[in-house]
């Protein structure tokens, strides 16, 4: 059956893209200029780099670039009839979100004397912000139109920037890899939107919500890309070479131990001892999410333990928690972002509190107080006014700051997701038909061989479901 392209989508998508790009071009012409001298990153954590040189930033920029456009894109191609949508819409959102982040972060952090100062570091910061939009979109992937996804990202990016400023300025969160600022925020923002966009028809499996060997292979390949480059993601904001070295090694240890745990537990859960590709595609990365917040602080043994615990929690989340949440609170999480980003993010936050409280005094008490009042930061830490004063700053105060940063991020992201979901439900925006959820044919010119193959696979799937009902 041929697909009739929606006239509203034919109008809305090109017009929206042209309008947004025109506005961005005008803003860049009027306000954006290059700056040659060093400026401070908006991600002003305690582990910020002390100096930004092109030779130091560009390799990290390339690694993060590969994670966004190759790793995440391939990982989202796991649905057999929506593999083009997973890759292509990831490509679209990433480009839009980076441009929009450059503008929002530029006016928020780098606007002075009527201009936004631009360096490669700014683009890297924008890519970190874009990650939040890509992760969040996974919760509603295949059930939203590209128009909705663009509006989704347009609303999320400013909220992310404001939340990042809050948790850094008022709580000076220790979060070198963005476990709270990126993973927790993106997870619960996406889940908030998904809950508002709940579809009762999807309480049971949609006929097109299935994978095949090719789509699973591409998705697993994306996982490996992310796995390889995750140490860069967790270490690029390190302040010193020693901190960067620790972050790289500890991230590798967490990822490696998490992968071994995934193979073991996946085989244990299955009655025939088979390994689940869904678990491999997700749980093998959970250690990278959890360790990010303390990648430069924890010991090697601790990194191994965090990786194992994160992978374990991710698998158990898929096995038990996701069905429970879908049944009890109507939360349809298409890509399982709660299992990969939410639960490991919570484990990472708790681990950071433990590490800070039991860490040696010269690491988490005196030196922490000195860093918070370092003149190089250019600010007097407001968190000292909340939890203590300059003479009584302790590890306990920082642990409270970590918990407060998590609470603020959770509340801001979930509330923002609910509001965004309500806006996306407005009838003026394109809403894909339920018959064409998880289907590339609505949006892409599909080669004839793929159309025939997709139709055949769909018929076989329907026949299998019919047969099972009769058994």
Image: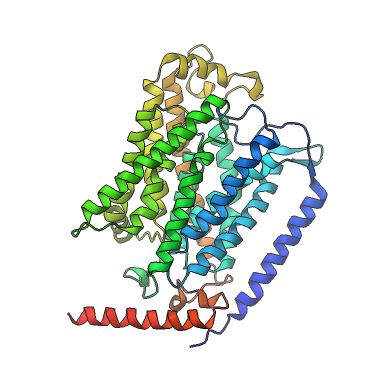
Q: Nearer the viewer, residue 441 or 137?
A: 441
Q: With 199 as the anchor, is 43 left or right in this view?
A: right
Residue 457 shows in this picture: yes
x, y percentage for residue 369?
52, 17
Q: Nearer the viewer, residue 174 or 11?
A: 174
x, y percentage for residue 422?
51, 61
Q: Quadrant of the C terminus?
A: bottom left
Q: With 313 as the anchor, is 90 left or right in this view?
A: right
Dividing the picture into quadrants, the one containing residue 209 is bottom left
x, y percentage for residue 199?
40, 68
Q: Nearer the viewer, residue 212 or 24?
A: 212
Residue ID at (42%, 59%): 335
Residue ID at (42%, 83%): 455
* Direction bottom: furthest residue: 1
Q: Is residue 70 above or below residue 145?
A: above
Q: Is residue 341 above or below residue 234?
A: below
Q: Is residue 241 above or below residue 271?
A: above
Q: Is residue 412 above or below residue 451?
A: above
**Numbered circles on residues, count:** 0
Residue ID at (68%, 65%): 17
Residue ID at (31%, 48%): 262
Q: Nearer the viewer, residue 5 or 404?
A: 5
* Direction top: furthest residue: 391
Q: Coloring scheme of the render?
A: rainbow
x, y percentage for residue 4?
56, 85
Residue 171 shows in this picture: no
């Amino acid at each position: 059956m041929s697909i009739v392209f929606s006239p509203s989508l034919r109008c809305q998508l090109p017009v929206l893209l042209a309008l947004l790009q025109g506005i961005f071009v005008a803003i860049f012409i009027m306000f954006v200029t290059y700056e040659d001298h060093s400026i401070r990153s908006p991600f002003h954590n305690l582990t910020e780099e002390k100096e930004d040189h092109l030779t130091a930033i560009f390799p990290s920029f390339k690694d993060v670039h590969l994670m966004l456009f190759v790793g995440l894109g391939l990982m989202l191609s796991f649905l057999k009839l929506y593999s083009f949508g997973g890759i292509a819409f990831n490509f679209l959102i990433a480009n839009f979100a980076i441009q929009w982040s450059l503008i929002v972060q530029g006016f928020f952090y780098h606007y002075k004397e009527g201009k936004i100062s631009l360096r490669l570091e700014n683009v890297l910061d924008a890519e970190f912000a874009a990650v939040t939009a890509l992760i969040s979109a996974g919760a509603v992937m295949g059930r939203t139109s590209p128009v909705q996804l663009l509006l989704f990202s347009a609303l999320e990016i400013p909220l992310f920037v404001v939340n990042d400023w809050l948790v850094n300025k008022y709580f000076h969160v220790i979060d070198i890899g963005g476990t709270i600022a990126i993973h927790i925020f993106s997870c619960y923002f996406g889940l908030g939107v998904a809950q508002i966009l709940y579809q009762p028809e999807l309480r049971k499996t949609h006929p097109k919500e299935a994978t095949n060997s090719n789509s699973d292979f591409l998705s697993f390949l994306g996982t490996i890309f992310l796995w390889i480059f995750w140490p860069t993601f967790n270490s690029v904001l390190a302040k010193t070479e020693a901190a960067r070295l620790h972050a790289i090694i500890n991230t590798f240890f967490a990822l490696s131990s998490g992968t071994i745990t995934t193979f073991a537990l996946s085989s244990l859960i299955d009655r025939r001892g088979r390994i689940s590709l869904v678990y491999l595609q997700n749980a093998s990365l959970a250690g990278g999410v959890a360790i990010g917040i303390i990648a430069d602080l924890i010991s090697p043994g601790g990194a191994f333990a965090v990786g194992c615990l994160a992978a374990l929690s991710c698998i158990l989340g898929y096995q038990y928690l996701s069905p429970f949440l879908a049944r009890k609170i109507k939360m349809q999480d298409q890509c399982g972002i709660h299992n990969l980003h939410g639960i490991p993010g919570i484990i990472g936050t708790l681990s950071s509190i433990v590490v800070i409280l039991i860490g040696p005094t010269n690491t988490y008490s005196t030196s922490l107080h000195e860093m918070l009042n370092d003149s190089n930061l250019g600010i007097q830490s407001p968190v000292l006014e909340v939890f203590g004063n300059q003479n009584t700053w302790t590890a306990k105060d920082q642990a409270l700051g970590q918990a407060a940063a998590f609470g603020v991020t959770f509340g801001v992201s979930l509330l923002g997701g609910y509001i965004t979901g309500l806006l996306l439900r407005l009838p003026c925006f394109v809403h894909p038909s339920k018959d064409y959820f998880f289907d590339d044919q609505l949006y892409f010119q599909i080669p004839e061989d793929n159309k025939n193959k997709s139709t055949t696979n769909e018929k076989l799937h329907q026949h299998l479901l019919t047969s099972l009902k009769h058994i």
